Image (spheres, helix red, strand yellow):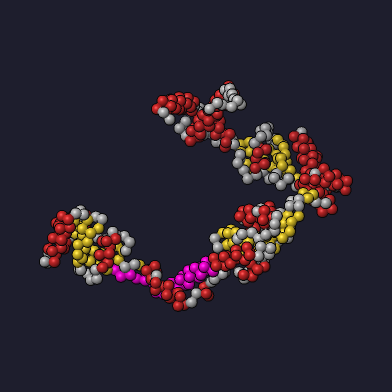
């Protein structure tokens, strides 16, 4: 952007922000509005329900052969069998390739000795030091002068207090906290761990912080756990390492054999001491287990696998878990013959007829009950259950949704309606009462007030944007633009 372009961009942005802020920040809520919303949100409804099970009505439906054949002919797309394949595959997994029994006692002990520091507390040292800050010859000369005094019998702690530039440790006579390897400056650490006996003093040591003279105060030797205590852990770890090594060696062998003999998987399976597994005809959307992996599905779509019938490349579907696949046979998408789907057609027609019968009875019962007539209910053999009190958010979603759209019943009476559950059952609902929550004064500084203000402000802004869209004309030129 040029300076003028940037200034214009900022100007437009500030104008837009001013307009939006004027809309959003001028919104407010009223006490009566909040009280009404509180009553609506906290309202409950007392209902009774009567369920007309779809299965019962479907079982009573009488479906003729003519109806079944007509439905089959009118809805062939419902009875399409997708393209299907017979698939062979060889699976290779690191699980069980090697176990603890493959690890010898000698291997475990050798690993323990080589990695003893990992099985206990590492050696720690406590030292005191005198530090002369700087990295030039003058600083080094000062440090060497201090070392000379120490060699002539001067007290280390007293010299640390008077001569060390590390003021914090100087107050303690140069003492530092316990530390192990990997904590301090490498040069400092190397010199500290080179001291053998308590009281030994190093020469002048240069680090990134300056020149040091180090005195060994104490040693906490490493305390490794006994081999017996960590043997099982080491054996398991070595077993996993061996399994990984064997897995990668076998996966390489599997890939090579599958490539060298591309028209079968038997040689590849024998090379890794595995078996060729086979499926019956199955569509790609119905694959399960290892074959349902996206990587396997992608491989099955490759032309050399799907069309030429060759082995796939080795496919890693998880760490230390691979598979090679091939397609042995395929059959195209087809509409299944009527004889194979007759039972399926009958089931669908029975379900449809059952839904109609259940809804017809529910509609009849609701009409009669709203008129105060219970004869149809008595004759149906169905009964309402016990009263239950539902809020707007309820596990019985369909019933609650209907109950909160029904008019409040008159005192001592009920309002009736019906709805459908997800499983197809029809439910007749009796609304016996509407209960309002106890009155409560809602503060204008409450979270509910903030929620109402934000919701209304967003609605205002959305409506303004929609209005601007409607009133704004945009013209697109289809003529080529000259460069």
Q: Is residue 244 magenta?
A: yes
Q: Residue at x 69, y 45 (%)?
A: 422
Q: Residue at x 58, y 22 (%)?
A: 473
Q: Residue at x 71, y 47 (%)?
A: 423
Which residue range is magenta in the image?
Answer: 220-247
Q: Is residue 322 magenta?
A: no
Name the image quarter holding the N terminus: top left
Using residue 41 as the reference point, say whether residue 161 is left or right of it. left
Q: Specify the quadrant of the image occupied by residue 36.
A: top right
- In percent of width and height, residue 318 lies at 56, 59
Q: Residue at x 80, y 51 (%)?
A: 336
Overall secondary structure of the magenta section = helix
- In percent of width and height, residue 255 lies at 60, 63
Q: Nearer the viewer, residue 455 or 100?
A: 100
- In percent of width and height, residue 61 lies at 83, 47
Q: Specify the quadrant of the image occupied by residue 259.
A: bottom right
Q: How many marks?
A: 0
In this rendering, the answer to whether 153 lies above or below 376 is below
Q: Nearer the viewer, residue 147 or 403?
A: 147
* Residue 31 in sight in this render: no
* Residue 80 in sight in this render: yes
Using residue 368 as the reference point, say whether residue 477 is left or right of it. left
- Residue farthest along the front direction in this orientation: 483
- In percent of width and height, residue 266 lies at 67, 67
In this rendering, the answer to whether 121 lies above or below 76 is below
In this rendering, the answer to whether 297 lies above or below 249 is above
Q: Nearer the viewer, residue 246 or 395?
A: 246
Using residue 442 as the reference point, say whether residue 153 is left or right of it. left
């Amino acid at each position: 952007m040029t300076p003028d372009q940037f200034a214009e961009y900022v100007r437009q942005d500030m104008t837009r922000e001013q307009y939006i802020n004027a809309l959003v920040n001028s919104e407010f809520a009223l006490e009566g509005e909040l009280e009404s919303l509180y009553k609506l949100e906290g309202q409950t409804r007392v209902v009774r329900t009567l369920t007309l099970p779809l299965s019962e009505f479907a079982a009573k439906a009488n479906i003729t052969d003519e109806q079944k054949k007509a439905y089959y002919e009118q809805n062939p797309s419902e009875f399409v069998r997708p393209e299907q394949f017979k698939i062979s595959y060889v699976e290779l997994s690191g699980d069980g390739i090697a176990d603890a029994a493959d690890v010898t006692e000698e291997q475990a002990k050798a690993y323990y000795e080589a990695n003893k520091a990992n099985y206990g507390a590492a050696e720690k040292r406590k030292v005191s030091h005198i530090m002369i800050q700087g990295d030039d010859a003058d600083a080094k000369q000062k440090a060497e002068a201090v070392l000379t005094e120490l060699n002539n019998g001067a007290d280390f702690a007293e010299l640390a207090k008077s001569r060390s530039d590390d003021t914090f440790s100087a107050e303690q006579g140069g003492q530092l906290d316990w530390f192990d390897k990997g904590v301090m400056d490498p040069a400092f650490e190397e010199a500290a761990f080179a001291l053998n006996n308590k009281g030994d003093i190093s020469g002048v040591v240069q680090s990134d912080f300056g020149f040091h003279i180090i005195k060994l105060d104490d040693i906490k030797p490493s305390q490794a756990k006994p081999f017996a205590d960590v043997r099982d852990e080491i054996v398991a770890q070595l077993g996993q390492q061996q399994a990984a090594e064997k897995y990668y060696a076998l996966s390489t062998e599997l890939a090579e054999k599958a490539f060298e003999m591309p028209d079968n998987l038997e040689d590849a399976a024998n090379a890794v001491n595995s078996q060729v597994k086979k499926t019956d005809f199955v569509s790609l959307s119905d694959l399960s287990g290892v074959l349902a992996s996206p990587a396997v599905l992608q491989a099955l779509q490759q032309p050399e696998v799907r069309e030429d019938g060759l082995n796939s490349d080795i496919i890693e579907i998880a760490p230390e878990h691979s598979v090679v696949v091939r397609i042995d046979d395929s059959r195209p998408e087809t509409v299944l013959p009527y004889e194979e789907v007759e039972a399926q057609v009958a089931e669908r027609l029975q379900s449809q007829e059952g839904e109609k019968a259940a809804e017809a009875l529910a509609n009849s019962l609701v009409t009669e009950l709203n008129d105060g007539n219970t004869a149809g209910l008595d004759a149906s053999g169905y009964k309402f259950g016990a009263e239950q009190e539902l809020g707007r958010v309820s596990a019985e979603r369909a019933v609650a949704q209907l109950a909160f759209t029904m008019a409040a019943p008159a005192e001592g009476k009920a309002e009736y309606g019906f709805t459908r559950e997800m499983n197809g059952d029809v439910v007749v609902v009796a609304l016996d009462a509407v209960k309002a929550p106890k009155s409560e004064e809602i503060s204008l500084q409450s979270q509910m007030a903030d929620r109402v203000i934000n919701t209304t402000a967003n609605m205002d802004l959305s409506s303004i944007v929609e209005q601007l869209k409607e009133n704004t004309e945009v013209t697109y030129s289809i003529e080529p633009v000259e460069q």
